[in-house]
Amino acid sequence: MLEQIFDQYKDALFDTDRDQALNIIHSALEQHIPAEEVIFQVVVPGLEDIANRMSDPFDISLSQHFLTSQITSDVIDLLLPAFAQPPGLAGRLVIGSAQGDFHSLGKRIVIGCLKSYMIESVDLGLNVAPERFVDEAVRCGAQVIGISSMMVHTARGENGCLRVRQLLKERGLEDRIKIVVGGAPYRFDPRLYQVVQADAWAENGMTAGKVISELIKEG
Amino acid sequence: MITALQRLIEASRGIPPDRIPVFCNMLDQGARELGLSIREYYTKGEYVAEGQLRMREKYGYDNLWSLFYVGKEAELLGCRHIIYSAGGPPNVGDMVIKELKDIEKLEIPADLAGQPAMAEPAKCLQILNREAGGKFPICAYITSAMTMPVILMGMEKWLDLLLNGPFSLRDELIAKCELFCQREIAAYRALGANVIVYSNPFASTDILPYRMIEELTCPSMANDLNSGGMGGVVFYCGGARLEKTIDLAITRQGFQTLYLGPRDDVAACKRNAAGRALTVG
């Protein structure tokens, strides 16, 4: 039965049909399928299906990616109260766009997707100073700092990831807090994350969940 | 000797010119050429024109740009704050549409050329025409109606409105942006721009599913462009890939020149164009 639900759910994601996706989840709960099973056998594999299709050129567009993240976030909000026991938090990250960068879309997609990995996101907003990334990560007990950049100069600039790395070094926090970056410049140059001294990069919101989960486990 | 403008015209007609026309997108680099900060560079049309002329002379390519920065279009519609960076292009720092109700209040000036935000680009175009008109193609950059909301309200809010509605407001905003696009093209043509680089990433399957491009983007592009004619219009997908929508671009909108994205497969795009349009990039 879960397989059938999964097939219907991933079709709804592909068609970016939010109402249909929510209906499918409601219907699963009405059939007394545990919320935990719905998340880990329907919702997370649904995200992974979209991620796999993204690796095939042209199969998934940005708008489908965006709506999948929104739908996933809505579905998780719907399912969490139905858990038999409150799910444990896998970890926490602070996320924001680099200083000088006012693009919010990628960050929002990532936050939506991370919910399904039980990772809590603290959204620092746009144009975030490097000091604030570090201060907030310490204050929140975050294991990961996520820095989003849409433009090359905010990715490579001295007030972006490079400065966050320097601050982590100066404060002796490198073992406790990892840096993940994402955004258009990193897709054009997959080695750029190394140049800006990040620990990892994520190509899209779907892969961000896996990458950040691994960083948290490593810590 | 053949001029750069003749070279472009011959290429666009499918006649092999003496060499392939070389277009360079040199913009902010003009500031360094003049020893100015990017902020100072964009305060005067004279600086931008001088930067363009010097860079073209120095590197020997075939075009001149009248574009300052993309946020200039938002300034024409009321944006009051542009953020300057030492190392990159200026960015919109004040969204004209902060809430959905601002869409109703958005007004498109009838006389775009007379707007204060157009004064310096107009001066720039005047100088470029005086110094290089008739010899070099002078490019203007026009953002499509489907894309314009990105710089008016931000990509996230625009995608939300575009995909989730309310659709009456979405359609109202697109209609207003179409009017802006028509008037902007007319203004730039009147000021002497002879190549219109029309940017529409929402015509790429990287951004929207094909069905939405057919149903929403194509009619909007017709509204943007049909009243001003397609002469000198170059179709640019804003860095996204054109490969899957080349046929639509040619058959539905009649684009004759297609500016491919950096991630496009050139051979596949040329196959899809099948000799019906010039591919550039």
Image (spheres, coloured by chain):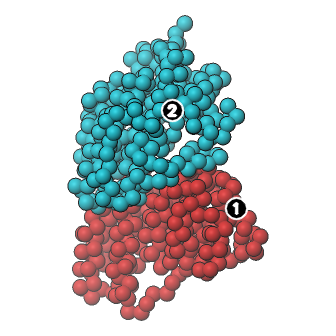
Instruction: State the residue lying farthest toward the top.
Output: B1
B99 lies above or below A119: above
For chain A, what colour was chosen? red
Residue A179: tell me if it is visible.
yes
What amino acid type is highlighted by mark number 1? Arg
Specify the quadrant of the image occupied by residue B248.
top left
The answer for how far apart the CA atoms under marks 2 and 1 are is 37 Å
Q: Residues within 10 Å of mark 2 (few under 14, many from 20)?
A: many
Q: Secondary structure under badge 1? A: helix
Chain of the residue under label 1: A
Which is more toward the observer, B132 or A32? B132
Q: Residues within 10 Å of mark 1 (few under 14, many from 20)?
A: some
- Percent x, y for residue B65? 51, 29
Q: Which lettered chain is shown in cyan?
A: B
Identify the mark at residue A163; answer none if there is no mark.
1
Q: Residue at x 31, y 45 (%)?
A: B107
Q: Residue at x 37, y 65 (%)?
A: A68
- Percent x, y for residue B243? 39, 40
Residue A187: tell me if it is visible.
no
Residue on which the image places disc 2? B120
